[in-house]
Image: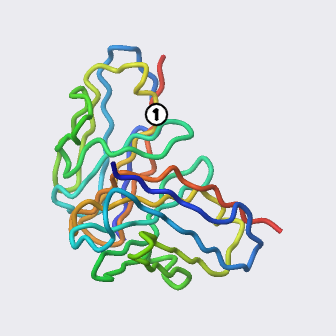
Amino acid sequence: DIQMTQSPSSLSASVGDRVTITCQASQDISNYLNWYQQKPGKAPKLLIYDASNLETGVPSRFSGSGSGTDFTFTISSLQPEDIATYYCQQYDNLPITFGPGTKVDIK
Amino acid sequence: QVTLKESGPVLVKPTETLTLTCTVSGFSLSNARMGVSWIRQPPGKALEWLAHIFSNDEKSYSTSLKSRLTISKDTSKSQVVLTMTNMDPVDTATYYCARIPRVGYYWFDPWGQGTLVTVSS
């Protein structure tokens, strides 16, 4: 199985800050990498698919990049409603695997 | 509007078999391009993919849980069913179903609200 790691595991930032989360795969997964946002008590929501494609309706302050084994998720200007845990997920090889998550809160 | 809703027991005893149902609306399980996955999340922990099924009955399972899982569908009822045998307290989790919008492109959108299953005697 492909192992996914994320860093940091948690972060605190101020409103308006640029926030960056990294996700690393244990082997080359091309661009088969998705990002989800999960707010407390809610189901996850797809934000980005195939590493860099913004899902319809998702604010443009969210972005993703990377390929191979190293990926980045960015919030260009953190908003109070972005408080959540963010997960990466690979689908280059079955079984599908998720990263451990990054919890983002407001400083 | 595409929606999915999970249903099943809130509490199961150790060694029992869990049966969960995902009822979908807004799309058809006979749609050749779409599938449904089950994903779970223990309290305070990360997401774990369990299984998926497509309209042609193609199925895939988690490596670690494969021996305990069975996924099936009833297209006429718009339902996908997941059974998990020999339940253990470590299987306590919120269980989600989610749509796979395109075969071969395994992202999940949207998700159901989830159902919390507790395993305890």
Residue at x 40% of width, y 76% of height:
B76
Residue at x 22% of width, y 55% of height:
A69
Helix, strand or loop at mark 1: strand
- The quarter of the displayed image where residue B30 is located: bottom left
Q: Residue furthest front?
A: B76
Q: Is residue A79 shown above or below B7?
A: above
Q: Residue furthest bottom?
A: B67
Does residue A89 appear to the left or right of A41 in the view shown?
left
Residue at x 29% of width, y 41% of height:
A47
Around disc 1, counting alpha carbons within 10 Å, would you say few (fewer than 14), some (14 to 19), or many (20 or more)? some
Q: How many marks?
A: 1
Chain that bears disc 1: A
- The quarter of the displayed image where residue B31 is located: bottom left
Identified by mark 1, the residue type is Ala
The x and y percentages for residue B47 are 48, 55
Q: Is residue A29 shown above or below A57?
A: below
Q: Quadrant of the C terminus of chain B?
A: bottom right
Q: Which residue is mark 1?
A: A84
The x and y percentages for residue A29 are 21, 61
The x and y percentages for residue A78 are 34, 21
